[in-house]
Image (cartoon, rainbow, N blue to C red):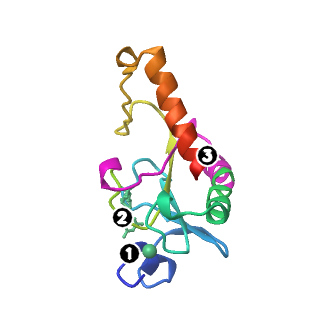
């Protein structure tokens, strides 16, 4: 896609700190470096978000995640864990609309990286939970 910053990075039109490339995917350092080694894994094919993946593309992209995760652990032995994040659409904080997976090594909880997931379980009865699961299951059946 001509106007996509990540397509330009993949094609070498914009300089980047590449960490990995194969036929299907490209991985490079996120300029923001939320933590040291913060890496983005992207499909070479321009897809906007997860809703544009098919199973084959998902297999090729997501199957590269453990390889990169282990490389980050080896590269930064002082890291103690890793957050893997994939934002989809604006409401979910996506800002670059070429699908990407963030790999963010964690060295300490005492950094500027935060994920806050409120526990809203008090608002959902057992029946409501069953209905939600059934609704998703029905959507999968129709997929
Ligand atoms: P999102 O918010 O869409 O999940 O993440 C987009 C990420 O792309 C951000 O973390 C941002 O720092 C990174 N980013 C934006 N522009 C560039 C760029 O030109 N080069 C690199 N390497 N990263 C970028
Ligand atoms: Zn693109």
Report, in whole angstroms, how far the alpha carbon at label 3 lies from the one at label 2: 31 Å
Q: Secondary structure at mark 2?
A: loop
From where the camera sits, is residue 137 visible? yes
Q: Residue shown at 62%/65% (left/top)?
A: 57
Quarter holding residue 64: bottom right
Disc 3: which residue: 141
| Disc sitting over residue 96 in the figure | 2
Query: Picture coordinates of residue 12 (x, y %)?
Result: 48, 83
Q: Is residue 83 magenta?
A: yes
Span colored in magenta: 67-92
User: Which residue is labeled 1 in the image?
Assistant: 5
Judge: label 1 CB < 8 Å from ligand 1.
Answer: yes
Question: Measured along the vertical axis of the image, is residue 100 above or below residue 76?
Answer: below
Give the structural element (helix, strand or loop) at label 1.
helix
Along the horizontal axis of the image, is 110 left or right of 38? left
Label 3 Cα neighbours within 10 Å, binned few <14 / some 14-19 / many ≥20? few
Q: Can I make out residue 100 in this image?
A: no
78 or 26, which is in the foreground? 26
**135 sits left or right of 75 in the view:** left
Instruction: Looking at the picture, tell me which residue is in the foreground, 70 or 85.
Output: 85
Distance between the alpha carbons at the discs numbered 1 and 2: 8 Å
Give the image quadrant in which the ligand numbered 2 is located. Answer: bottom left
Secondary element under disc 3, as helix, strand or loop, is helix
Ligand 1 within 8 angstroms of badge 2 C-beta: yes
Q: Provide residue 108's location: percent of width, then percent of height.
A: 47, 32
Q: Residue at x 53, y 31 (%)?
A: 133
- Mark 3–mark 1 distance (CA, rounded to whole Å): 37 Å
Instruction: Look at the image and tell me in which quarter the N terminus lies.
Output: bottom left
- The residue under the point 37% across, 14% down is 122
Along the polypeptide, which appears first: circle 1 or circle 2?
1
6 or 20: nearer the viewer: 6
């Amino acid at each position: 896609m001509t106007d996509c910053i990540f397509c330009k990075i993949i094609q070498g039109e914009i300089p980047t700190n590449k960490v990995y490339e194969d036929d299907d995917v490209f991985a490079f350092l996120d300029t923001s470096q939320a933590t040291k080694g913060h890496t983005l894994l992207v499909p070479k094919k321009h897809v906007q978000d997860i809703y544009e993946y098919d199973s084959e593309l998902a297999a090729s992209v997501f199957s590269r995640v453990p390889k990169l995760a282990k490389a980050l652990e080896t590269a930064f032995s002082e890291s103690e864990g890793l957050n893997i994040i994939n934002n989809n659409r604006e409401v979910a904080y996506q800002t670059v609309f070429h699908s990407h997976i963030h790999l963010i090594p964690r060295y300490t909880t005492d950094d500027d990286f935060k994920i806050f997931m409120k526990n809203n379980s008090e608002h959902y009865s057992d029946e409501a939970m069953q209905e939600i699961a059934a609704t998703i299951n029905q959507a999968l059946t129709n997929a």
